[in-house]
Image: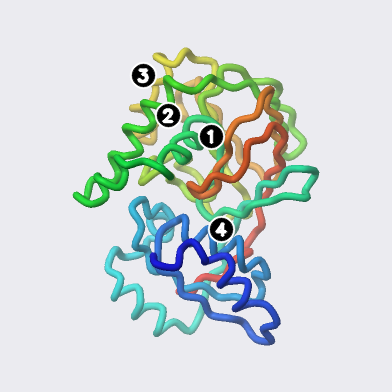
Amino acid sequence: MKYAGHAIDISRRLVKGADEPVKIIVLGGDGTFNEVINGARDYEKIEIGYIPTGSGNDLARGLGLSADPMENLNRILDSTEFTCMDLGCISWDEGESKKFFAVSAGVGVDADVCRRALSSTLKKVLNKIGLGKLTYAILTLQSLFAMPTMNAHIVADGVDHGILDKIIFIAIMNHKCEGGGVPMSPIADAYDGKLSMTIIHGLTKFAALGAFPSLLAAKHMTNPAYLGIDFKEADIVLKTPFVWHTDGEMSTYNTVMHIECLPGAIKLMK
């Protein structure tokens, strides 16, 4: 999208001082949608129509949208009502810094893949020939063996899950899939007022690689190496800083993170 890099500023200018709800049509991928929701934070003042044109399109997948841009445009132009979708929020520096997400946030391999994808020549080449989804598979293999594992203390909705070691990733899901259709949390529901956390831990990297096929088949939650937690609020403390992402966009390197669900925060045109 031509103006994707300016989506935050454009959204702020549109919403600032508006007396009536502002209708915003987002044309782009998950990253562009993420920029809009992080720019227009007065969510009660906006209604968003979404036309997916990205390479991953996990938000569109979660919303069950057509791949036809004209069909989506006509749907939006004919829309007379909206649905209220949950958003996620991660915050750090004791709440002074925060990012919102529509699809997912996370730390570990998936976040490192997002970091690599932002400057990946491979992604540009594969996108041009219609094989963009392969980018994430290839970069996942690179990240898995290049980055160290993590240790983290996790508390969710007041329940202390203790300190987990050899963590490969922690995925915080609002929708079921990220990374171009990888079903990180088959039970995630963007309308239930909760987020779903999926963690793989306690394995060597080769063993983790062997556990990935069950993830791709959405059968991983029966594997004891995977831990699933549904929650409204959670705190994660890492032993050392790692990169975090929100909707595939790099957000911060940090050790202490607060995550919460904002129920029904965003209005989407039906």
Q: CA distance from mark 4 to mark 3?
A: 33 Å
Give the labeled residue for mark 1. Answer: 198
The residue under the point 63% across, 36% down is 253
User: Circle 3 sits in a helix, a strand or a loop, which is it?
Assistant: helix
Q: CA distance from mark 1 to mark 3?
A: 17 Å
Mark 2 vs mark 3, foreground winner is 3
2 or 4: tag closer to the N-terminus: 4
Mark 4 surroundings: few (<14), some (14-19) or many (≥20) residues within 10 A: some
Mark 4 vs mark 3, foreground winner is 3
Give the labeled residue for mark 3. Answer: 210
The residue under the point 71% across, 22% down is 162
1 or 3: tag closer to the N-terminus: 1
The residue under the point 33% across, 34% down is 137
Give the labeled residue for mark 2. Answer: 220
Counting from the top left corner in percent of width and height, residue 178 is at: 43, 45
Whether pointer 2 and pointer 1 mark residues with C-beta atoms closer than 8 Å, the reply is yes
Mark 1 surroundings: few (<14), some (14-19) or many (≥20) residues within 10 A: many
Q: Amino acid at mark 1?
A: Thr
How are the residues colored? Answer: rainbow
Q: Amino acid at mark 2?
A: His
In the picture, the quarter occupied by the C terminus is bottom left
Q: Is residue 201 above or below residue 231?
A: above
Counting from the top left corner in percent of width and height, residue 84 is at: 57, 67
Is 213 placed left or right of 246 in the picture? left
Q: CA distance from mark 4 to mark 1?
A: 18 Å
Viewer-side residue, 47 vs 12 = 12
4 or 3: tag closer to the N-terminus: 4
Counting from the top left corner in percent of width and height, residue 119 is at: 41, 43
